[in-house]
Amino acid sequence: MRRTVMQIHNHSFRGVQAPRRGLTIALRTLCLAALTAGAVSGAGVPNARADFQAGWVAYERGDFLTAYNEWQPLAEKGETRAQFNIGVMYDEGKGLTQDRSKAIEWWTKAAKNGDAQAQHNLGLAYLAGTGVGQDYAEAVSWLKRAAGSGLIRSQYALGRMYDYGFGVEKNEAEAAKWIRMAADQGFDKAQYNMGKRYRDGIGVTKDKDAATKWFMAAAERGHVRAQHYTGLRYLSGDGVKKDAIAALMWLTLSARAGDRAAAKDRENLVSRLPRADRQQAESLADKWRPKQASAGG
């Protein structure tokens, strides 16, 4: 499993507000396609925080063995961030011999202590059968815990499990409920998915206005297909007022990102618009910047 290293700010230790630094997960493609961190339990003791920080500083400079030596005693004492991070180190083989079974072992400890990131990773591991036997029911169990803690990617993954009937009875309404939670927190893939649901009436009542709203929300965060669909909606006036310039802007953005269908639609639209409109749309596309997604994992 591929993981990325980053900082997570402003998580609480037991009654003490302090910045949390740790390792967090990257979106990973699994058998459900585009599924894929969280709550933390710590002693809140200054020395423990200093030891964890020393490990983080070592990790940032690439001294993985020192990081492990700082974190391992904390992990043995039940410090969930250290447990999770050691799991990532075993998973990636950084400073340690790569061993997914050991990664699972440490993530399981952190997950049982309530760490949502570890719960999410376990869910994906059981889903894919990576380091453990494939077990959809167990995957659902862990994803539910992480999703219940508000972890966005777990909410989305759990929704997709209900879509496919993996480990649970297939239930499109339940899928829509969990995916909507992730969409409400700004996850572009969930927003795009909700757009399709409202367009096609999958787990929700068909609603073209709602479909357009969600496609536009995802488009504004840089989702390429959503940008294509948003362009088409501005072109047709489906759920939004017709606007050829806005249509061309969104089609241009999608085409620039490699969407071939959008490029074709853009070419057709360009041939029908006056030069001034084309220039305005190009200028808007040049100035456009994506909205920042939620930091909720």
Image: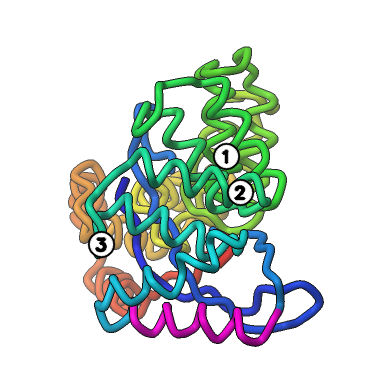
Q: Nearer the viewer, residue 274 or 239?
A: 239
Name the dominant secondary structure of the magenta segment. helix
Within-10-Å neighbours for mark 3: few <14, some 14–19, many 20+: some
Q: Secondary structure at mark 2?
A: helix
Contact (Cβ within 8 Å) of mark 1 with mark 3: no
> To which residue does mark 2 refer?
182
Q: Where residue 166 sits: x, y (%)? A: 51, 18
Label 1 secondary element: helix
Residue for badge 1: 194
Whether the magenta-drawn stretch holds residue 164 is answered as no
- Label 2, residues with CA under 10 Å away: few <14, some 14-19, many ≥20: many
Per the model, the C-alpha gap separating discs 2 and 3 is 31 Å
| Front residue of 22 and 198 | 22
- Say which of 33 and 111 sits in front: 111
Which of discs 2 and 3 lies nearer the camera? The answer is: 3
Q: Amino acid at mark 1?
A: Met
